[in-house]
Image (cartoon, rainbow, N blue to C red):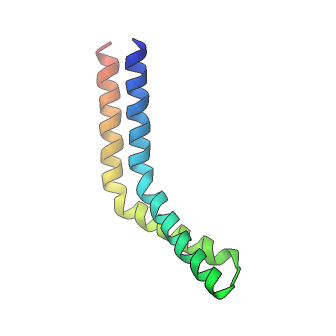
Amino acid sequence: MTPEQVIEIGEYAMRTVVLVAGPMLLAGMAVGLVISIFQAATQINEMTMTFVPKILTVFAVLILSLPWAIGQLTGFTEDMFRRIAGM
């Protein structure tokens, strides 16, 4: 296995991780930003006010994007097994 192949596999793995985790992280970040702006405007500082909506949002996005994420991870795994078999 050449160094170029190792780098290519690493890039592919990192790209897959970003694609699968990205929607949940972006949704949680957006909800956190909206709640932070609301808290700054109203001067209400309560930790559960930020924690609970973020958890619910991330869970909802996870449920909605689960079929797509499983497809991405399955494709990655199949490609890795093909590469291993080709060595």
Asked whether residue 47 is in view, the answer is: yes
Q: Is residue 50 above or below residue 74?
A: below
Q: Identify the residue at horizontal 52%, vertical 64% (top origin).
A: 29
Quadrant housing residue 77: top left
Q: Is residue 19 above or below residue 60?
A: above
Asked whether residue 1 is in view, the answer is: no
User: Where residue 6 appears, x then y in whole percent?
Assistant: 42, 20
Quadrant location of the C terminus in the rendered image: top left
Horizontal arrangement in the rendering, residue 10 relative to residue 45 (left or right) = left
User: Where residue 4 appears, x then y in whole percent?
Assistant: 39, 17
Q: Identify the residue at horizontal 28%, vertical 15% (top origin).
A: 86
User: Where residue 57 appears, x then y in whole percent?
Assistant: 48, 69
User: Where residue 14 appears, x then y in whole percent?
Assistant: 44, 37
- Of 67 and 49, nearer the camera is 49
Q: Residue furthest front?
A: 41
Q: Identify the residue at horizontal 44%, vertical 29% (top origin).
A: 10
Q: Identify the residue at horizontal 43%, vertical 46% (top origin).
A: 18
User: How many numbered marks appear?
Assistant: 0
Quadrant location of the N terminus in the rendered image: top left
Q: Residue furthest bottom?
A: 42
Q: Is residue 45 above or below residue 17?
A: below
